[in-house]
Image (spheres, grey):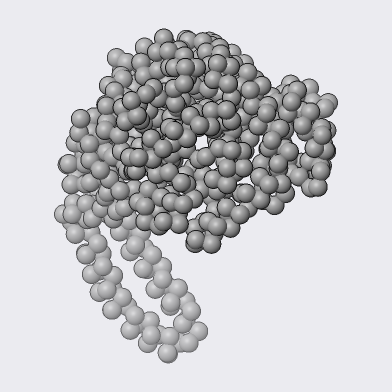
C-alpha cells in the first residue's frame, strides 16, 4: 500500500480544535477523546452501568436481524447482531441514503466504522461490532437522489432519479417504480466505460434493485453487500420495528421538551461564547422532533400516498408546524409516541440521543460538520441519563489511479498543487510551451503601436476638438483588435496542446472535481469499474487514523 498524508483546506474550526486538542474548553463539550487510551475503557464501563437506560438488547437484536435479512446480510453480519444481543458494544456512524451510495465519503465512513470497531475490540478485549445508521427518515430528495461519475471526456456526469409525485415524506417512504430503477440502471451502465469488471458490477446492482422500492433500501443493500465480509450491521432509522422500541424515549422527549430545548440553547450559547460558529439550527420554540402527517392541502392529492414529514414547534402545551396545518397538545403527542411511534422522527440534534438509547454506542464515527454540531448535544444526553460516546473523526482519502499518477509526474504536480494552485500551475506550464513568445511579442507590439498612435490622436484632438471622442473610441477599438488577434493565436496554440490540456483536466476532475475533495463528489463505482474490489480492500487494510487526517492512496 502506498499512502501519503495530505492536508485539506481548513474546515470546521470547532472540529479542528477537538481533533488537535488545542482548546480545553472545546474538549469539555465532548467529554471523552478518541486519542486518550483510557477513555475507551471508561466509556465501556459507563455503558455497562447505563444498560438499564437503553432498549432491551434482545428486542433490538430481533429487529436488526429481521431488517438485515431483507438485505441478504452475510452470516458474519448476523453473528455480529447476535453479539449485540449478548452484550457487545457498537461503533456507529451514519449517513442519509443516497443514490448508488452517493459520494466516496460514505464508503470512507463505513471503512472508518469497521476499522474503529476492530481497534476498540483489540483494546478492550471484548466484542465491538460495526453499525451503519441509515438516516432514512430524512426527506431532502435533492441531496439523496443523485450522484456523480466521470466519463471518458473527461467530464462529470450527474445521475439522478426523479421524485415521484406526492408528499414530502422520508426517503424510506418514497417508493420508486420498477421502471424508474431500470432507467437509472441503464443510465449508469451507459455512463461507465466498458471494463472487465463492469458486467459483474451491473449484475450485482440489478440483483439489488429488483428487491428495492426505495433509495434507502438500495443504499442499505449496497452497503451490506460491499462490506459483507466485515459483518457491517446496517439499520434504517425509519424502520417501524425500531420505532416501536424507541417509543419510551420519544415520550420523554415530549414530556421534557422545554428542558431539551434549553439544553441545546445553553450549549449553543456556550459554543458561541468560545468563539466558534454554531453548526446546527437552534431555534427558540423548535421541538427538535418531526411528525409524519398529511398536510391539509394534500388531502385531495391523487398521488399523496405517504404522510409529509413536518418539523414541529412548541408553544406552551401545544405543538404545531410553522404554517399551522398541524395543532396538537402534549397529551396528543404522548398518545402518538406510545401507540404510533412510527409517526415521529428525530432531527440532527435529537438523533444522537436516540442512537445512544437504541444502541450501546462506544464510539460515533463522524464527519467534520457532524463533530461540530455534536458539540451541542452533551447536556441533552445527560438529560436522559446518558453520556456522549467517544467521537472518532472519519478517515478521509483521495484515490489516485496510475494514469493520473503518471500525469502528475509528467507535469511536475503534487496533490497540493491541484488543490491550491491548479490554475496558476496550468498557466505557468502553458507559458513555458510558448515557443512563439506570444505574450511578449503582442505586448511589445501594443506598446509600439500606441506610442506612435497616441501622440497623433492627441494632436488631432487639439486641432479638431470635435474628433476627440471619435479618436479615443478608435484607440480602444485598435487595442481590442490587437487583443482579439492575441486570443486567436493563443486558441490555436492551445489546440496544439489539446492532449496535454485534457490530461490537466483529467487530473483536476479526478482529484478535486468542482473545486471539492474527490470524496465529496465522485461515486465509488468510478473505481470499482476500473479495478474491481482491490481498492476497497486497500482502504480496509489502511492503518486506523484517530485524527481523521486526509491520506492519498496510490492505486
Q: Residue at x 66, y 45 (%)?
A: 260
Q: Position of residue 526 (x, y in %)?
A: 36, 27
Q: Position of residue 190 (x, y in %)?
A: 43, 20
Is 347 above or below relative to 220?
below
What quarter of the picture does the N terminus occupy? Answer: top left
Q: Which residue occupies the foreground of this view, 55 or 496?
A: 55
Q: Residue furthest bottom?
A: 463
Q: Position of residue 240 (x, y in %)?
A: 65, 20
Q: Position of residue 459 (x, y in %)?
A: 37, 87
- Which quarter of the picture shows residue 409? top left
Q: Residue at x 55, y 57 (%)?
A: 270
Q: Which residue occupies the foreground of this view, 517 or 368?
A: 368
Is 200 above or below relative to 366?
above
- Which quarter of the picture shows residue 177? top right
Q: Residue furthest front?
A: 49
Q: Residue at x 74, y 25 (%)?
A: 338
Q: In this image, 66 relative to 292: left or right? A: left
Q: Which residue occupies the foreground of this view, 249 or 436?
A: 249
Q: Residue at x 66, y 41 (%)?
A: 288
Q: Which residue occupies the foreground of this view, 527 or 106?
A: 106
Q: In this image, 404 relative to 309: left or right? A: left
Examine the rendering and report whether any part of residue 527 can be seen: no
Examine the rendering and report whether any part of residue 439 can be seen: yes
- Which quarter of the picture shows residue 464? bottom left
Q: In this image, 320 relative to 461: left or right? A: right
Amino acid at each position: 500500500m502506498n499512502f501519503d498524508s495530505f492536508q485539506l483546506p481548513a474546515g470546521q474550526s470547532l472540529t479542528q480544535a477537538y481533533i488537535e486538542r488545542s482548546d480545553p474548553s472545546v474538549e469539555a463539550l465532548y467529554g471523552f477523546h478518541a486519542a486518550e487510551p483510557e477513555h475507551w475503557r471508561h466509556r465501556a464501563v459507563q455503558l455497562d452501568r447505563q444498560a438499564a437506560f437503553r432498549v432491551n438488547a434482545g428486542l433490538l437484536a430481533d429487529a436488526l436481524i429481521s431488517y438485515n435479512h431483507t438485505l441478504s446480510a452475510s452470516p458474519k453480519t448476523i453473528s455480529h447482531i447476535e453479539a449485540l444481543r449478548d452484550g457487545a458494544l457498537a461503533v456507529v456512524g451514519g449517513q442519509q441514503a443516497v443514490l448508488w451510495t452517493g459520494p466516496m465519503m460514505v464508503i470512507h465512513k463505513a471503512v472508518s466504522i469497521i476499522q474503529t470497531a476492530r481497534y476498540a475490540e483489540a483494546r478492550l478485549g471484548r466484542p465491538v461490532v460495526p453499525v451503519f445508521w441509515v438516516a432514512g427518515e430524512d426527506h431532502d430528495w435533492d441531496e439523496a437522489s443523485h450522484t456523480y461519475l466521470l466519463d471518458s471526456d473527461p467530464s462529470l456526469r450527474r445521475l439522478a432519479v426523479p421524485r415521484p409525485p406526492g408528499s414530502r415524506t422520508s426517503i424510506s417512504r418514497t417508493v420508486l417504480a420498477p421502471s424508474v430503477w431500470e432507467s437509472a440502471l441503464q443510465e449508469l451502465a451507459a455512463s461507465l466505460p466498458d471494463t472487465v469488471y463492469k458486467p459483474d458490477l451491473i449484475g450485482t446492482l440489478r440483483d439489488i434493485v429488483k428487491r428495492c422500492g426505495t433509495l434507502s433500501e438500495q443504499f442499505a443493500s449496497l452497503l451490506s453487500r460491499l462490506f459483507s465480509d466485515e459483518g457491517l450491521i446496517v439499520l434504517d432509522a425509519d424502520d417501524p420495528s425500531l420505532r416501536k422500541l424507541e417509543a419510551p424515549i420519544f415520550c420523554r422527549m415530549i414530556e421534557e421538551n422545554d428542558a431539551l430545548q434549553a439544553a441545546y440553547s445553553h450549549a449553543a450559547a456556550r459554543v458561541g461564547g468560545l468563539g466558534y460558529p454554531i453548526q446546527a439550527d437552534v431555534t427558540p420554540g423548535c421541538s427538535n422532533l418531526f411528525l409524519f402527517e398529511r398536510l391539509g392541502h394534500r388531502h385531495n392529492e391523487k398521488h399523496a400516498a405517504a404522510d409529509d414529514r413536518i418539523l414541529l414547534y412548541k408553544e406552551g402545551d401545544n405543538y404545531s408546524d410553522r404554517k399551522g396545518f398541524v395543532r396538537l397538545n402534549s397529551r396528543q403527542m404522548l398518545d402518538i409516541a406510545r401507540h404510533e411511534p412510527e409517526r415521529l422522527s428525530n432531527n440532527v440534534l435529537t438523533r444522537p440521543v436516540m442512537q445512544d438509547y437504541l444502541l450501546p454506542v462506544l464510539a460515533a464515527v463522524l464527519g467534520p460538520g457532524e463533530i461540530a454540531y455534536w458539540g451541542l448535544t452533551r447536556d441533552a444526553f445527560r438529560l436522559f441519563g446518558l453520556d456522549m460516546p467517544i467521537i472518532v473523526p472519519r478517515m478521509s482519502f483521495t484515490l489516485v489511479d496510475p494514469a493520473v499518477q503518471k500525469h502528475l509526474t509528467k507535469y511536475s504536480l503534487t496533490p497540493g498543487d491541484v488543490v491550491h494552485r491548479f490554475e496558476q500551475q496550468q498557466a505557468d506550464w502553458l507559458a513555458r510551451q510558448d515557443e512563439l513568445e506570444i505574450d511578449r511579442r503582442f505586448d511589445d507590439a501594443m506598446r509600439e503601436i500606441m506610442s506612435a498612435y497616441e501622440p497623433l490622436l492627441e494632436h488631432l484632438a487639439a486641432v479638431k476638438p470635435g474628433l476627440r471622442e471619435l479618436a479615443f473610441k478608435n484607440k480602444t477599438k485598435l487595442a481590442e483588435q490587437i487583443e482579439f488577434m492575441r486570443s486567436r493565436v493563443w486558441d490555436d496554440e492551445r489546440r496544439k496542446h489539446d492532449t496535454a490540456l485534457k490530461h490537466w483536466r483529467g487530473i483536476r476532475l479526478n482529484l478535486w472535481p468542482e473545486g471539492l475533495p474527490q470524496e465529496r463528489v465522485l461515486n465509488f463505482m468510478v473505481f470499482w469499474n476500473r479495478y474491481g474490489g482491490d481498492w476497497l480492500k486497500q482502504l480496509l487494510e489502511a492503518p486506523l487514523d484517530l485524527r481523521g487526517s486526509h491520506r492519498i492512496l496510490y492505486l
